[in-house]
Amino acid sequence: MAEVVVVGGASEGGDLVARAIRDLIASRPDAVLGLATGSTPLPVYASLAVSLREDPLDVSRVRGFSLDEYVGLPEGHPESYRSVITRDVVELLGLAPDNVLVPNGDPGALQTAGEDYERAILAAGGVDLQILGIGRTGHLGFNEPGSSFASMTRVKTLTPETRRDNARFFDSPSDVPVHCITQGLGTILRARHLVLLACGEEKAEAVAAAVEGPLTAQRPGSIIALHPHVTVVVDEAAASRLDNLAYYRYAYANKPRWQGI
Ligand code: PGA
């Protein structure tokens, strides 16, 4: 069962996950982080940045792999996930730029980009801690409903709903690319620890489907039931549709603190 941690708000969730990442880097200076874009993980990166400023830790060997990228945005486009990760993670945390990879969304490279990315993740020894958001469609990364549980990094077509959700980052909804390249659900399942964050009522249904199933490709988030170490960090609103919420609170309240998350 995924561990569900209900937090008072996004910044408390960010602090909790940032602490786990800090502990990981302290014990493994060349840790491999799985990075997510979108609004949800921002408090994690912000909290980790503050912690690293107040109490510096060598992050020069930390490596990172981002989940996904739009296809076809011009290089340097401010909303390409390469730009977002550079701005919100690499520069903010002071990571070595060459240590952080994002799938290649260049249309000319797509035939081999997925395999190249999988090879790079394997060569790094796999992802230690994968940060995940979840879409209202239930997508993890950009694995929209119907994605194979065994899928690896590949090109996908975004649903109209996801394009609408992400239109807030672009000048016009039609500017949101139709295609993306995303780590597959099979890729995500290989990471050693999955940390899924969600805030707000609009994520409550996707969170309930992810945590309490049923396991179905129509709800990509439900693959977390197949993974041995998952932490779901949610605020009250995102937790509001969970049937077994009282039990999750009870289990977490009684968890030995040395276990961390
Ligand atoms: P959000 O996106 O964090 O911006 O809500 C999450 C997602 O689409 O996976």
Image (cartoon, helix red, strand yellow):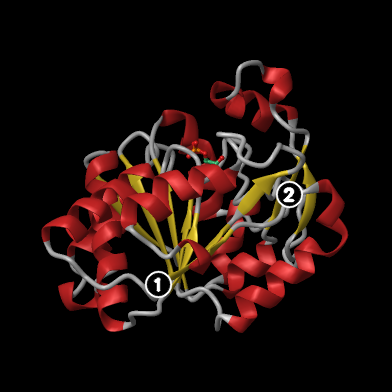
Q: Choose between 75 and 89: the one closer to the eye.
A: 75
The residue that label 2 is drawn on is 105
Q: Amino acid at mark 2?
A: Gly
Q: Amino acid at mark 1?
A: Val
Asked if one can make out residue 119 in the rendered structure from this viewpoint, the answer is yes
Q: Secondary structure at mark 2?
A: loop
Q: Residues within 10 Å of mark 1 (few under 14, many from 20)?
A: some
Percent position of residue 57, x then y: 22, 70
Q: Which mark is residue 62?
A: 1
Percent position of residue 37, x then y: 50, 46
* Residue drawn where x is 63% and y is 52% of the image: 68
Q: Which quarter of the picture shows residue 257?
A: bottom left
Q: Residue furthest left?
A: 54
Considering only vertical position in the picture, is 1 above or below 197?
A: below
* Residue drawn where x is 35% and y is 33% of the image: 237
Dots 1 and 2: beta carbons under 8 Å?
Answer: no
Q: Choose between 163 and 32: the one closer to the eye.
A: 32
Asked if one can make out residue 243 in the rendered structure from this viewpoint, the answer is no
